[in-house]
Amino acid sequence: MKLKFTNLMLMGALALSANTFAEGGKPVKGASPNDPPKKYIDPANMNPSVKPGDNFFDYANGNWVKTNAIPAKETRWGSFNILRQSNTDKLLTLLADVSKTAGQAKGSLKQRVGDMYASGMDSVTIEKKGYTPILPELSRIDKITSLDGVISEMLYERVNGIGSPLFGFGVGQDSKHVDKYIVSLRQGGTSLPDRDNYLKDDARSKKIQDALKTYITTLFTLTGTSPDAAAKNAVTVYELEKSLAKSQLSRVAQRDPNATYNKFSVADFSKTTPHLNWVKLLPMLQVTGQDTLLVGQPAFFKDADALLAATPVEDWKTYLKWNILQGSASLLSSPFVKASFAYNSALSGQKTQTPRNERMSGQIDGALGELLGQLYVEKYFTPAAKQYMVNLVNNLKVTLGDRIKNLDWMSDATKDRALKKLAAFRVKIGYPDKWETYPGLVIDRSDYYGNLKRISKWRYNFNVTRLGKPVDRSRFGMTPPTVNASYSPTNNEILFPAGILQFPFFDFGADDAVNYGGIGAVIGHEMTHGFDDQGRQYDADGTLRDWWTKDDADKFKSRADQVVNQYNGFTVLDTVHVNGRLTLGENLADLGGLNVAYAAFKKTKQGQSTTKIDGFTPDQRFFLSWAQVWRSSQRPEAAAQRILTDPHSPEEFRTNAPITNIDAWYTAFDVKAGDKMYKKPEDRIRVW
């Protein structure tokens, strides 16, 4: 089953050793005086045969990329992955310890985390059970005889934590009334990562389509369906999903928050979907007392409703069984797990399956993150790191405010509103002030599949029971070990989990250039999301409301279009280009964040000096730190898929594109006309 999480709209995510850092670059507390000094910018990772102005990513990271092959269990490898692996290793240490002893106090943190891990690692029991955990679901679907029965099954699966066929459903903030929760409906119903995977007919797309059909056939065969019937089922499922994909909005179209904000009365929306009577369906989804709902893509629901009526019930039963199979395959015995991996490998290029213990670690972090997170924070995160981040965030807020005040393209009226929004930023660092305890959630040491089903059902109930309650803005949108960061427009908040507050982003022993080029640029990135093409449409309290003068909005769009055009020109694979419109928000955040971080760095003592460390000036170290954050390589299959689905540009272009618009980079590395990355001063893009 696919675990369902609360519908927190976390937009603008960055991706993206618990060393500790003191002002003035003092040694790490507790470090041996005989330890060699750490090279925060290591020339051994660089490729000095490449001019900085020709390809800065290669200059800064070329030798590292050359000598660090992608591990077989990974689809890409770089700074983020290395840090995530480090955090995974820490979590595995915690999980091995807490799962040693059975019989701990029922309902306690250690009992639930330990027994969840033990249940997932009990491969003997999982193998014995085969696919029996999903037999009740398949048998129930077999008994369906009508379209009403099909629809009832779709709702039953959702409420009971089993699956989410046909459409997306959740409860979240009303973005135009952010103090209230509201029901939201979204397009869905497809298995491939993006609608374009169904709609394109190039060789790469056809390979992915064939992989899905093979996967469907294999899973049905594993549950006793004849090969011929299983192959027929694959065609049935694929054609249904392709029809749904044709009705979906593109990812670029969904970037417009006003276009996806469509509020209806429940009765009026039901008139547009005669076979999906939401007046009757919402109570079946445990939603009562709601007279309005938000619909992200109304046209999709009209088409899905028509498809429901036009498709034989037997075909829908096949589709429903497929949803059970694909949602549970990775949780069952090894033939199902191998089939799941073979399919995912075709999409990503991953060579070998991730070890079971690492898969279980990630699963528990996602499912019980605020229980496991308490153990992680207690052992690996220091109050000193949190306080340093608080200070750094405040420094960058002041710097971004100064930059807004000095913009030459924005009117005073819009500047005042922008500064009001900046001042209202909420900041969350490390871990939540109040931990979620998952009350009532039962974890059984001998019931792996059942545990996941109960977790999913608990999360569904938690989600819908928020209706009618005050919006809780204190909730943490990421688990503490996560190597990432985020901005939420409806909360107007920036969030930095404990997991990212480590080298190469942050280190107590590093000089300011390294930390400002690393975590400083991350902070600036998340702040700038509040003013990117999406974030700028939300005001100081998070409400989706226009606060711009028309002239200022037009000037912003003109500058943003320059960014779109710059990234559209980058080639990733053969004829595959970066989608500058899909990645616009992240590209604006990279450009703004790096500018803000550099301006803040120049206020430090080191930023105002020219003293070299390891042969590099402070400014050079700042930009090299930025580059090493993004050092990475990836498999071609993963790169092609990311272009369709990922709002972030590939790491090489995240490194190179922003700096071509920053004058200080040209000075630091003596970049001149004739160098491949050179842009004339008048062509350098300046937004925030």
Image (cartoon, helix red, strand yellow):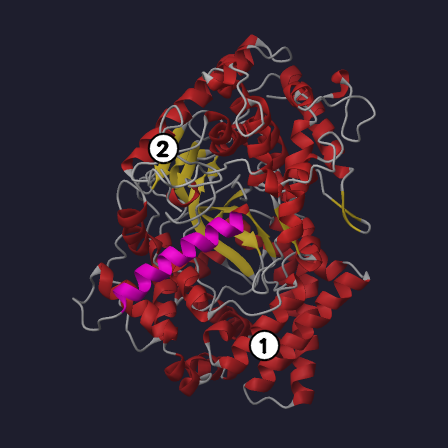
Q: Horizontal and vertical percent for residue 381?
A: 32, 43
Q: Horizontal and vertical percent for residue 182?
A: 42, 45
Task: Please name whichever residue, 226 or 515, is drawn nearer the observer in this view of the structure.
Answer: 515
Question: Which residue corresponds to the image point at 40% horizontal and 58% vertical from the top-left?
Answer: 89
Q: Horizontal and vertical percent for residue 354?
A: 51, 67
On screen, 61 above or below 687? below
Look at the image and tell me whether residue 377 can be seen.
yes
Chain part drawn in magenta:
80-99
Q: Secondary structure at mark 1?
A: helix
Q: Is residue 6 magenta?
A: no
Instruction: Name the residue tied to disc 1.
Output: 339
The kind of residue tagged 1 is: Ala
Question: Which residue corresponds to the image point at 53% horizontal and 44% vertical from the top-left?
Answer: 16
Query: Residue 199 lies in what quarter of the image?
Result: bottom right
Task: Please name whichever residue, 680 or 247, is drawn nearer the observer in this view of the structure.
Answer: 680
The kind of residue tagged 2 is: Pro
Question: Which residue corresponds to the image point at 49% horizontal and 28% vertical from the top-left?
Answer: 516
Q: CA distance from mark 1 to mark 2?
A: 50 Å
State which quarter of the image contains the C terminus: top right
Which secondary structure type mostly characterizes the magenta part of the structure?
helix
Q: Is residue 97 magenta?
A: yes
Task: Please name whichever residue, 350 or 583, is drawn nearer the observer in this view of the structure.
Answer: 350
Instruction: Name the residue tied to disc 2.
Output: 27
Look at the image and tell me whether residue 145 can be seen.
no
Question: Which residue corresponds to the image point at 26% horizontal and 48% vertical from the top-left?
Answer: 378
On screen, 644 above or below 4? above
Badge 1: residue crowd in 10 Å (few <14, some 14–19, many ≥20): many
Say if mark 1 contacts mark 2, CB within 8 Å: no
